[in-house]
Image (cartoon, rainbow, N blue to C red):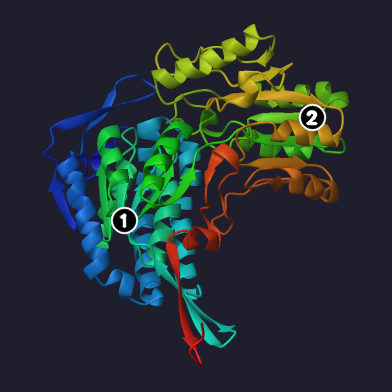
Amino acid sequence: MNNWKASVPNHLFDSFYVDGLWVRAASGISKEIINPSTEKLSVSMPMASEAEMDNAIQAAKHAFEQGAWPRTTPRNRCILMHRLADRLSERIELAAQLWTAQVGAPISLTRKLAPLATLRLRYFADLAASFEFESERSTQHGHAKILSEPIGACAIIIPWNAPLPILMTKLGAALAAGCTCVIKSSPESPLDAMLLAQCVHEIGFPPGVINVLMAGAGVSSHLVKSNDIPKVSFTGSVRTGSEIASIVAGRMGRLTLELGGKSAAILLENADFDKAMPTLEQYTMPFSGQFCFSQSRVLVPKSREGEFLDAFATMVRARKVGDPWDTSTQVGPVLNSSQFERVMAYINEGIDEGAEIVCGGKRSSFSERGYYIEPTVIRNVDRQMSIAREEIFGPVVTVQTYETVDEAIEIANDTDFGLSGSIFGDSETAMAVARCLRTGQVGINGMELTPSAPFGGYKMSGVGREGGPEGLQAFLETKAVIFPDQMVY
């Protein structure tokens, strides 16, 4: 816990990485990162000015237009990406510690999930080597070559909650496509991207292909508005995503947006609750519910509500709230005071509207300092309540009942979001239900975080997909080169 700063090179605390060089921040603007478990200052990080952002944009643009990266073979890109993954894997324990230090995710969780970053980078490295960037098809009077070409210099804007795994999903796809990048890390958790920049620098990535800096809202908007950035990939809030979409659409740029969810776990009448519980334990409120894929609504048959609540609440009450650096801790703090107040406001609003607290619902007694909230289960929830419709992003799960499978589908779909979901019961019925859900990813009798499957949402959960070949395609433009055997009008 106390040694993570000693493992971080000093220049990561005061510099940006632009055009293959460490550039000392000059704006004089900084962001204080507050330890959410103690409410004390952890570290202060520099924020970029518009001029510094412009330097990064131009470096990425020049590397794309004049550099070797977009023109090298996919096989060569694969090789260098694996070298980057190798170097990052050597730092994966530090990456886990940075995750815990900045946002309070339990170290037991970050040590488990941090390796996903290298797994995702390696997936896209291998995909680069096997992807069909050129194909040929017949036309009425000849043939055509179909070329999939990199879009250009891309903005990659990452959130605070899982910065490194999310970054590597975006960056892996962009690099495999042959794009260059400006990475704008979250002010709440900037060190993950800076650690990546250190690895990039050490293995000798071509200058300008990967540029990393931190910035506030105004300078981030400057990045998104740039005509030299034809593609923006963003993960974050609906409000910010909507603003980005408006800006980028106005200049006909390309977009990938992942904006959150209100996912439902449906337990069918014949579901085995004992078998479902391990998945629900991991995915209903992981990292204090601060993951977009959290299964924050659980739908159960009305006839089995009592049976389910007994089992589920027993499991939730047993989850240990504590110091995120303690390896036995399962539930740490939420991000900051604003997030704490937001979550508590949702809980109190639900109570005022008639919902019933099964367990939790209060500030945790673990510590007088820190943003700790008891893991909370709420029943007697109407689908029109805010706690059933809006993304709370906290350790709060609502339990709703249904009479028929059709009603369960209707409740699950009755939300502005459509990111994730899960179904527990016999596989045939579960698959039939999955086909009816308006959501981008559904787990049947379990969940898996895998780079080979596309991830993204319907409705307000976003635009486009990340992961899988679909994630690579999102960083490509399509060109048709036509070879007619004769002149045809």
**322 or 157, which lies in front?**
157
**Disc 1 versus disc 2: distance between alpha carbons?**
45 Å
Compared to residue 123, the image places residue 216 above or below, namely: above
- Horizontal side of residue 446 vs 55, given as left or right: right
Which is in the foreground here, disc 1 or disc 2?
A: 1
Q: Is residue 329 visible?
A: no
Q: Amino acid at mark 1?
A: Cys
Q: Which residue is mark 2?
A: 300
Secondary structure at badge 1 equals strand
**486 or 4, which lies in front?**
486
Disc 1 crowd rating (10 Å Cα; few below 14, some 14-19, many 20+) is many
Q: Name which residue lies at 42% across and 44% down.
A: 234
Which sits earlier in the primary sequence, circle 1 or circle 2?
1
Q: Which residue is mark 1?
A: 181
Secondary structure at badge 2 equals strand
- Horizontal side of residue 397 vs 161, given as left or right: right
